[in-house]
Image (cartoon, coloured by chain):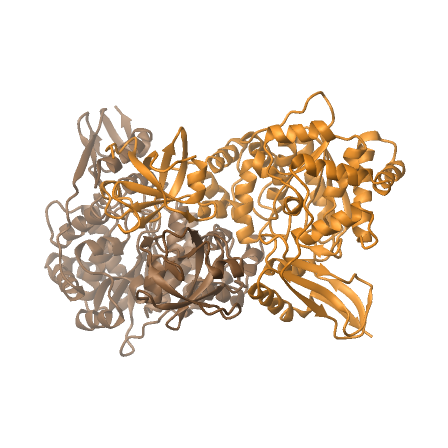
Chain colours: A brown, B orange
Amino acid sequence: MVENGARGYHMHVLRIGIDTHEEAVIYMRADCGVCRAEGFSASARLKVSAHGHALIATLNVVDSALLPEGFVGLSSHAWDKLGLAERDEVVVAWAPVVSSMSDVRRKIYGHRLDEAAIHGIIRDVADGMYSDIQLASFLTASAGDRMDRQEVVALTRAMVDVGERLHWNGNRAIYDKHCIGGLPGNRTTPIVVSICSAAGLVIPKTSSRAITSPAGTADTMAVITRVDLDLPDIRHVVDQVGGCLVWGGAVKLSPVDDVLIRVERALDIDSEGQLIASVLSKKIAAGSSHILIDIPIGPTAKVRDEHAAKDLAELMEYVGRAMGVNVRCVFTDGSQPVGSGIGPALEARDVLAVLRNAPEAPQDLRDKSLELSAQLLDMAHGHGLDAAWEEAKRLLDNGQALAQFERICRLQGGFNEPPASHFQKEVLCKVHGTVSSIDNRKLSRLAKLAGAPQLLEAGVDLKVRCGQRVVPGDCLMVVHSGSSGELEYALGYYQSNPGIIGVDET
Amino acid sequence: MVENGARGYHMHVLRIGIDTHEEAVIYMRADCGVCRAEGFSASARLKVSAHGHALIATLNVVDSALLPEGFVGLSSHAWDKLGLAERDEVVVAWAPVVSSMSDVRRKIYGHRLDEAAIHGIIRDVADGMYSDIQLASFLTASAGDRMDRQEVVALTRAMVDVGERLHWNGNRAIYDKHCIGGLPGNRTTPIVVSICSAAGLVIPKTSSRAITSPAGTADTMAVITRVDLDLPDIRHVVDQVGGCLVWGGAVKLSPVDDVLIRVERALDIDSEGQLIASVLSKKIAAGSSHILIDIPIGPTAKVRDEHAAKDLAELMEYVGRAMGVNVRCVFTDGSQPVGSGIGPALEARDVLAVLRNAPEAPQDLRDKSLELSAQLLDMAHGHGLDAAWEEAKRLLDNGQALAQFERICRLQGGFNEPPASHFQKEVLCKVHGTVSSIDNRKLSRLAKLAGAPQLLEAGVDLKVRCGQRVVPGDCLMVVHSGSSGELEYALGYYQSNPGIIGVDET
């Protein structure tokens, strides 16, 4: 230990083997000279540097039994982020004042933030300066309609600027699609990418993990193939086949987005400004020039009516123009889930069924995938939606889309059939009647309580559609889980929320 | 380990010796049967029960070296809260859904919350159901002017309801005072309580720790005597001498307030609605019937102009009436600190100097303490402010207030003179001129960077007042600290913020 209060103390690090998820924690002995000299106490924020990198960690103070004298411990995530090896030297110092937090406080008190302020916040978030408490405050302060359109543009630009940005060979148009979510199932992306890249479009798709849903496209694709490709590997796949289906987080495109999503998930919030910045920053960083946004509308979808959808589309297109990209929004039916499966593996199964033209393939998932593919092909060729739809249908029916999907998966690292769950329970109908409504939000919550998306095979397999006639004993859904505990937990939620599937009795 | 997914798993606990401050953390082995069966992963929220108590803890997953098979660890705060002993049995289960978070989300999106919703949130916070992330979101969502007056009343009532409530013998009026803060130094409370209780008023004062300031009254009193008295001990002190000067948190009056303050401190926010609920819930729970609120006004005080002060006073008095107590607000000069010391021990020194009528006693602290005492004596007797002021002055000048203060301290547990700091540095004036302004906020920040309030003797000793003539070499302030690192850190902040003490050069 070299005493140097201003520039930090040199100490040696041990892998303490504590996984705190993504929050960086440093463990120091209560009796260590540095803690005592500097007055460090539990929950202090400290700067830890090694190998030319630095991060801010929260201090946990441990008694002597856990750490030998002269050593500090680091949580697994921080350990990996600094690229440490056992007994490496780290430098520990007070964390600098996070000056951008004064702008977060200004936002809390209702002031608007200019481009420089927003850039400062996002820069500090990217540098790991924010604690989870501070991230939660920033997200809450800018949730709802608390950001104006200039702030959303600034947030989008800042999120692009702090990450890597892809530039593709040649001056070709780069296509992308995104669903703003809220609809369980609805896994059109792998099908659309397969059809459009089979049609010759360049569509290098990077997807997010789930925010508040039971599965994101990246979660679903991770069931079938590798999704954590780095930039050179992504380029290789796209150069070969014109498309890919990877997780955006692994390539540091808009890296702040993943940090924010982790806290948004814990809070179960997902606000309009953050949503637009999250979506467009990822797309723009990925080098997209033409972006199709699918906005499902329904009473329990994320967007509840056409008025809200128009506002969102208008803001989305505004930010797109400000950022120099072509954004087209389409409104789709969000009154009930799309497809049968809800959860990574169950959705992967549906995707494969559609691509394989299997008789059990959900018709609604097929129809919607064709519709979205047609929109993208129309953006590309401009020959009208009817011609575009015919082309999409041809590529799906003749197996070219399936072949394309398999090529993409093999290039990304392999092809696995989706696994089955170990615990299942059928939920049966008790009355005669007609299914009148399906609550997307509560169904999502049910699938999450069953273990999705962390457990790939967990979720819900929906067996009915709105308008369908049912009789006692009909299976409404099958809940899939990885443990009896989670299964009971999910079924308990179903029992106390009987309106998840509404049936008009006859 | 008894397998029981629904009702929880019985496991044995070891004191792992990790101090995470107040966030409850449970440590489980990655390879433990429960983690694997239930799919628990890092950052999961789990319910931990023992001895008829329960709390919600965040899961950290550890490798096998830290914990023997079959055991779980708990952070020190959680360990103490559950009253555990080595190898006690605890029951671990998924945390129930925190249903009140849906109301927090409604608040995030700008909806107003009714009494039941606010009560549900505060009940869950009191029960330890909220993670730090969720607390930060609730505080941010209800900060600024985002709560209307009915919500503030509901919040105040909920905060009273979830804690203990004092009832004093007889039907006597119970007096209290509170400064809404923002002014460094300004430690009038111990002096006012001494004067007023010497005059026969019952003034059982419970104080908070600092929120965003370098010291609260509880921090300052902790320098001199014990402040963490329980209810029977407080009753004993007040029955003997009519007054006390204790920390409110130890008696579970409005226990949620301390939880919220911890997160507010990390965010450095302190909003109007939370402020009023925090102050009045503590006073009402303490059984107060007559409450004097000191609102300092100044460009760098918490309240910046008379308009804001009137709004705050009006809302404070409104909430008081709704809760059935008599609230009087007085506006005082908030243009510069009161007293010389800023930080727990330095403020304690000033308090003692005033009570002892010492020649070096800060005149402004004496004057303000007399003014506030007069307001309280006038609320009690109604003979006008002039008569009340004369009485207060007599009790201070003739030593009865000092004798009363010493009685209170001895009954609370002893009397210690304030300690001196180990590291000090004078900040000298470099120019000829007149002190024109003192930035309360930056001065507070400086005192905090020096280590206050965690380190009792740290802080700033201010040597000048606005209007004072200064020449090069005059001492503007002395910075006190507990380590060379913190001292350098604080002085670095001073160097880069030269306007902390403004001097008009002549």
In the image: residue B94, left or right of residue A369? right
The residue that appears at 50% across and 61% down in the rendered structure is A151
Q: In which image quadrant can residue A403 be found?
A: bottom left
Against A10, residue B364 (above or below) is: above
In the image: residue A431, left or right of residue A257? left
Q: In what quadrant of the picture does the C terminus of chain A appear?
A: top left
In the image: residue A485, left or right of residue B316? left
**Residue B157 % position (x, y):** 59, 32
- Kindly give the residue lying farthest to the top in the view shown: B170
Q: In what quadrant of the picture does the N terminus of chain A appear?
A: bottom left
User: Is residue A253 visible to the viewer in this orientation of the structure?
Assistant: no
Q: In which image quadrant can residue B200 be found?
A: top right
- Kindly give the residue lying farthest to the bottom in the view shown: A170
Q: In which image quadrant can residue B146 be found?
A: top right
In the image, B131 versus B428, the foreground residue is B428
**Residue A457 % position (x, y):** 20, 46
In the image, A113 versus B169, the foreground residue is B169
In the image, B421 versus B453, the foreground residue is B421
The residue that appears at 82% across and 52% down in the rendered structure is B363
Against A231, residue A147 (above or below) is: above
**Residue A3 % position (x, y):** 49, 68
In the image: residue A460, left or right of residue A305? left
**Residue B466 % position (x, y):** 79, 62
